Image (cartoon, rainbow, N blue to C red):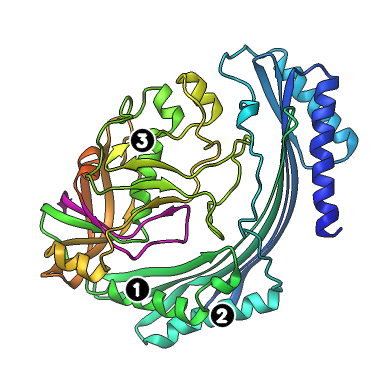
Amino acid sequence: MNIVEERAALIQAAEIGLEEAKKQGASSAEAGASHSTGLSVTVRQGEVETLEYNNDTSLGLTVYFGQSKASASTSDLSLQAIRDAVTAACGIAKHTQADEAAGLADKALMAREFPDLSTYHPWQIDAESAIEIATECEQAGFDLDKRISNSEGASISSHEGDRIYANSHGFLGQSRSTRHSLSCTLISNDAKGMQRDYWYDVARDARDLASAEIIGQRAAENTLGRLNGRRVKTGSYPVIFAADIAPSLFGQLISAIRGGALYRESSFLVDHLGKKIFPDFMHIHEQPMLLKGLGSAAFDSEGVATQTRDIVGEGVLQGYVLDSYSARRLKMTTTGNAGGVHNLTVEHNNVEFSELLKQMGSGILVTEIMGMGINTVTGDYSQGAAGFWVENGEILYAVDEFTIASNLRDMFLGIQAIANNVETRGNIRTGAVWIDNMMVAG
């Protein structure tokens, strides 16, 4: 079955599901049909460790009887299987308690324009070629320095997917995307034991990936940089979150302003709309229409049109992150974020990373965080970390086995600058973040 036929089959399955739901008495319904294929290879010490193919098809259906709802799914798109799934969902919905916030997103909010966001770039790569690239990546790391003594492997993956979303408003949206990645994790040893680090790249278009040699060498450089680590003296220090881990900081912001946390009153940012939570220079916004963006989409998982919008402007919280259900619970309107944010972008201060280090002077550069010590209800933040000691703007030596702690309120307000080395390998795009003060426990 070719791509055109596959998409036609998905559309047909979604339409059959909606039609059958109507026949069985549902007042409204929605259907999501998808097909994905992929190849993943991991090579370790020159030998193939894993080789995986995937070819998955699914149909998810949600039916509503008034404001009672239920869902069912099937991987079989035959007519009878779809009917059986709808029957199962309808049977459950008839015994489900009504929820006044349940229902499809408002019809007026459905997307009407579907621009090509350049999210689909298939890579015609076979297993042999993938193995060759992964092997080259790992070997580039070994060749950089004899102190690289072992490897956790180099991995390459290529996946593509086609998704249809339809509902009884008459909406039918189609999206097709690809995601390709290459990574390498290497090991070295010093008097204190084993040290490991990694590097990777991910892109919609394989032609945008860094070369195997560059990724392998960067993984080796990062690993070697961890050698001869020292302990840091417990105290309060300025901290810089490296660009590749800084997105986690703003991921906590999104968790705190997500509708579910707000209507349950389980967030430290409840009732903070219109209030200052960052310094004046901070601007955080969504850019769902970026070409090749990993978070680009014309509509969310409810069919609602996405939009470019400010979440934080001049340090003030301008908007929450809502789907239709949480919006109704809060007596607000969905922000088109069913399924998450779309290319959340943190504007930088147009300062080079090296200059950011100089401006900080002395403190900690955090390059890795570990653990689950974050309480979104209170904002308390405590994470295991690894990184480097910075003195007079220069990275002096690795530091490991330490903890960084603060409260997210203070961390957000304590941001001094954002570097221009923007991380684009994910859905949150930011440069390195300098925070004025955190407790560091060695």
- In this figure, which residue is indicated by the disc labeled 2? 135
> Picture quarter containing residue 191?
bottom left
Q: Depth-wise, is mark 2 or mark 3 nearer the camera?
A: 3
Residue 2 x/y as whole percent? 84, 60
Indicate which disc, 2 or 3, sits on the residue closer to the N terminus.
Answer: 2
- In this figure, which residue is indicated by the disc labeled 1? 223
Residue 71 x/y as whole percent? 69, 27
The answer to whether one can see residue 88 in this image is yes
Q: Which residues are magenta?
A: 416-442
CB-based contact (under 8 Å), mark 2 and mark 3: no
Name the kind of residue labelled 1 in the image: Thr
- In this figure, which residue is indicated by the disc labeled 3? 318
Quadrant in which the N terminus appears: bottom right
Nearer to the camera, 388 or 434: 434
Nearer to the camera, 145 or 430: 430
Q: Which mark is residue 63?
A: none
